[in-house]
Structure formats: structure tokens, C-alpha cells
Amino acid sequence: MPRGTKDDGRELIRRRVVEAAADLLAREGRDAVTTRAVAAAAGLQPPAIYRHFADMDALLEAVAEHGYATFLAAKRVDPDPPDPIEDLRAGWDLAVEFGLANPALYVLMYGEPRRGTTSAAFQAGMEILLGRIRRLAAGGWLRVDERLAAALIHATARGAVLTWLSLPADQRDPALLTAMRESMVTAVTNERPAVQDAGPAGAARALRAALPEQTTLSGAEQHLLGEWLDRLAADG
């Protein structure tokens, strides 16, 4: 058998196992994802699972990766949104809606602090978020530096979903989600573009966001100017 055909067959079986585990997780919760149950759902004998995954933790990591990829496919990217703050709200809402629609999967993906940080799909999703933040910074809307903005946006969305899921159904008030989103917007953005203000901090953030796109300065010069701009932005 040609090697490519054998590898393709292994990948198909691996995908079938991951999808079976993801389906069990969605329908019956994490405790239902056992070797025997996954094997039965995938149409395999239980020992076959361990020819594709070292242990159950490795299988759950693959299910989480499947979740990141599914979420990434749902993201909508506008490279030039007419209103970057509304674009930020829409991205936050999409993340929360995904969590509420896929509670068990979301807890697996985001319930443990370090899970997903090396996932290619997770990193691609973070790049989309960083692109939104960079557009805010370039327009002078960003109140804090880009790394802090990313942490605040990600943390509030994660916290909103996990808090919502922890509440009894009769105590789940949509106003909680709206309040958390608007608190995030207030913490991250200015009411007006800061570049219109007299102070240097907003202008520094806007220039810092645009710096990687210019080609006039050398790498060393960009690095030095970036340090100066970071200090100016921090003073604001």
C-alpha cells in the first residue's frame, strides 16, 4: 500500500474519533467521553483509540483543537470596518455566542488556563483579535496598549461565558453579558479618537500600530522608536 494512502487512512480514522468524542461531549458532557464510549461511537474497538492518541488527555486536546478550528471558521473578518468599536463589539459577541451554544466544548477549550496556547487555530484566532486591536490603535481609539487590550478582551469574553454557565438557568440575565461587554469597551477604548487630543499618548499608540507597515526605518531603528513610543503611550 502506498504510504500516502496509509497515512490518509490513519488521518480519516483519527478525525472520526475526534468527531465522535466531540459529539459525545456536546450531547452528554465530559464524563461521557470514555475510551469505550468514543470507540463505540466511532465504530472501533477500544484499543484502536490508543493507536492514534497516547491517552485520553491527548484525545481531549485534539477535541479542543477541533473546537478552536470550528470557532475560527465562524469568525468574520472585515479588514476595513466602518466603525472599529462596533467591530470590536461584534467580535466579542461572536465569541460569547459560541461559548453559550457549545458549553461543554467551551469549558474544555477555555476552562484550563494553559489549554490551547500552542494550538494553530487558537493562535490564528488571536491574530484576528490583534488585527481588530491594531485598527483601533491606528485610528487613535485605543486607551491601553495592545497587549493589555487583547488580554482584557479575551478575559472578559471567557469570564462572561464561564460565569453564565455557572449560574442556575433562572438566574441567567442577558444584562450581565451586555454589562460585561460594555465594561470591556470602556476599559479598552476612548470615547473619541485620542489622536485629536493634545497629549502625546494617543498619537504614540496610533504611530506604534502603524510602525510595522513602514519600510523607511531599519529594523534597529524601528525597535528603538517602538520602545520610545511604548514609553510615551504608557505615560498617558
Image (cartoon, grey):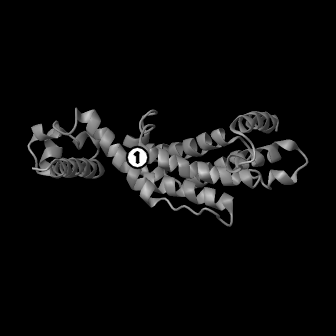
Left of 18 or right of it: where is 77?
right
198 or 153: nearer the viewer: 198
Left of 139 or right of it: where is 173?
left
Q: Residue furthest right?
A: 198
Amino acid type, label 1: Tyr
The residue under the point 8% across, 43% down is 45
Left of 60 or right of it: where is 70?
right
Quarter holding the C terminus is top right
The residue under the point 72% across, 50% down is 214
Please tell me in which quadrant of the rendered image residue 63 appears: top left
Left of 45 or right of it: where is 159?
right
- In the rendered image, residue 56, in percent from the top left (x then y), is placed at 24, 35
Residue 100 shows up from this direction: no
Residue 151 shows up from this direction: yes
- In the rendered image, residue 181, in percent from the top left (x then y), is placed at 61, 51
25 or 208: nearer the viewer: 208
89 or 144: nearer the viewer: 144
Count of picture labels: 1
**In terms of secondary structure, where does tag 1 sit?**
helix
Q: Which residue is mark 1?
A: 106
Q: Dot 1, crowdedness within 10 Å: few (<14), some or many (≥20)?
A: many
The residue under the point 13% across, 50% down is 2
The residue under the point 70% across, 40% down is 145
Rendered view: 143 above or below 112 = below
- In the rendered image, residue 33, in percent from the top left (x then y), is placed at 23, 42
- In the rendered image, residue 59, in percent from the top left (x then y), is placed at 26, 39
Rendered view: 135 above or below 230 = below
